[in-house]
């Protein structure tokens, strides 16, 4: 189970890392291409006490993250936040998410999309499901649909620094630098010690300053 949790954390971090290739290897005996219909017999579990505890701690963790200036300490807090985000509380949804990741790693885009479509239909209030599908669309350069899913993610969890980072990167690729800069500042409001956001703000400020002169 610890391995599965690590996979989920790395998958959820894709926007921060900037590439799906950074994902950890999946279980050796996992069947990434198993038809999604096989999941019909899986039973969803209710959110456990541990999951509820994680969710109840999110506000405290975000308050802590906002005050931390040391990268290592802030990163440790961010990992705790990802842990709460990436466990849906449902065995079925977690399994769909894991298999979608395996499909993404195997470049089986049709299966990955099908699995993630099921996630957002079955759990429309699960922010990380939308973020994961946004990540999928990002990796295949379908920016309009990625942005659409990011917007849903942020409506459900406005502090989602991973989704904000992904949106900022897309805006930069679309040469919408002013909007990208604003979005990176939004990341820093939530996660001030985020090095990627810090560097991107500096780079974009310099780039835009050159345009204005």
Image: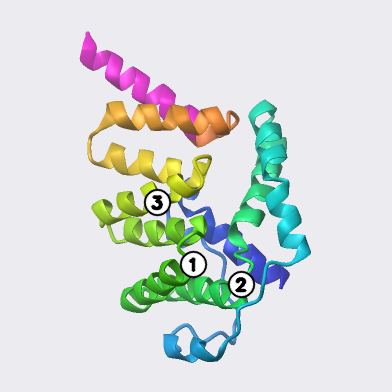
Give the image location of residue 178, x and y in percent: 29, 26
The residue that disc 3 covers is 152
Identified at 52% across, 29% down, the residue is 188
Q: Where, quadrant-wise, is the C terminus in this rendering? A: top left
Q: Is residue 69 visible?
A: no
Give the image location of residue 99, x and y in percent: 50, 77
Identified at 43% across, 49% down, the residue is 18
- Decide if residue 24 is on the left or right side of residue 80: left
- Decide if residue 48 is on the left or right side of residue 145: right
- The disc placed on residue 123 is 1
Identified at 77% across, 63% down, the residue is 49
Q: Does the magenta stretch include residue 201?
A: yes
Q: Where, quadrant-wise, is the N terminus in this rendering? A: bottom right
Q: How many labels does the image show?
A: 3
Among the 4 quarters of the image, the one containing residue 132: bottom left
Real-space Cα separation, disc 3 to disc 2, in angstroms: 20 Å
Identified at 49% across, 59% down, the residue is 125
Instruction: Report the front residue among 47 and 12.
Output: 47
Local packing at callout 2 (Cα closer than 10 Å; few below 14, some 14-19, many 20+) is some
Instruction: Report the front residue among 120 and 132.
Output: 120
Local packing at callout 3 (Cα closer than 10 Å; few below 14, some 14-19, many 20+) is some
Secondary structure under the numbered disc 1 in the rendered image:
loop
For the residues labelled 2 and 1, say whether their Cβ atoms are less than 8 Å apart: yes
From this view, report whether residue 204 is shown above or below residue 85: above
Q: Looking at the image, is mark 3 or mark 2 earlier in the sequence?
A: 2
The residue that disc 2 covers is 90
Secondary structure under the numbered disc 2 in the rendered image:
loop
Secondary structure under the numbered disc 3 in the rendered image:
helix
Q: Does the magenta stretch include residue 9?
A: no
**Segment tinted magenta in the rendering:** 197-213
Real-space Cα separation, disc 3 to disc 1, in angstroms: 13 Å
């Amino acid at each position: 189970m610890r391995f599965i949790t690590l996979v989920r954390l790395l998958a959820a971090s894709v926007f921060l890392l900037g590439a799906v290739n950074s994902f950890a290897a999946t279980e050796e005996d996992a069947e990434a291409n198993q038809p999604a219909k096989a999941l019909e017999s899986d039973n969803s579990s209710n959110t456990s006490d541990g999951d509820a505890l994680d969710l109840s701690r999110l506000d405290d963790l975000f308050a802590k993250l906002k005050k931390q200036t040391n990268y290592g300490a802030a990163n440790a807090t961010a990992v705790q936040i990802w842990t709460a985000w990436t466990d849906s509380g449902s065995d079925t949804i977690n399994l769909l998410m894991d298999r979608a990741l395996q499909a993404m790693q195997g470049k089986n885009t049709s299966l990955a999309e099908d699995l993630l479509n099921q996630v957002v239909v079955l759990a429309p209030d699960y922010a990380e499901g939308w973020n994961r599908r946004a990540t999928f669309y990002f990796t295949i350069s379908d920016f309009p649909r990625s942005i659409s899913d990011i917007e849903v993610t942020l409506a459900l969890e406005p502090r989602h620094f991973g989704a904000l980072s992904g949106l900022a990167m897309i805006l930069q690729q679309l040469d919408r630098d002013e909007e990208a800069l604003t979005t990176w500042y939004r990341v820093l409001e939530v996660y001030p010690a985020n090095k990627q956001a810090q560097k991107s703000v500096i780079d974009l400020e310099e780039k835009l300053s050159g345009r204005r002169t």
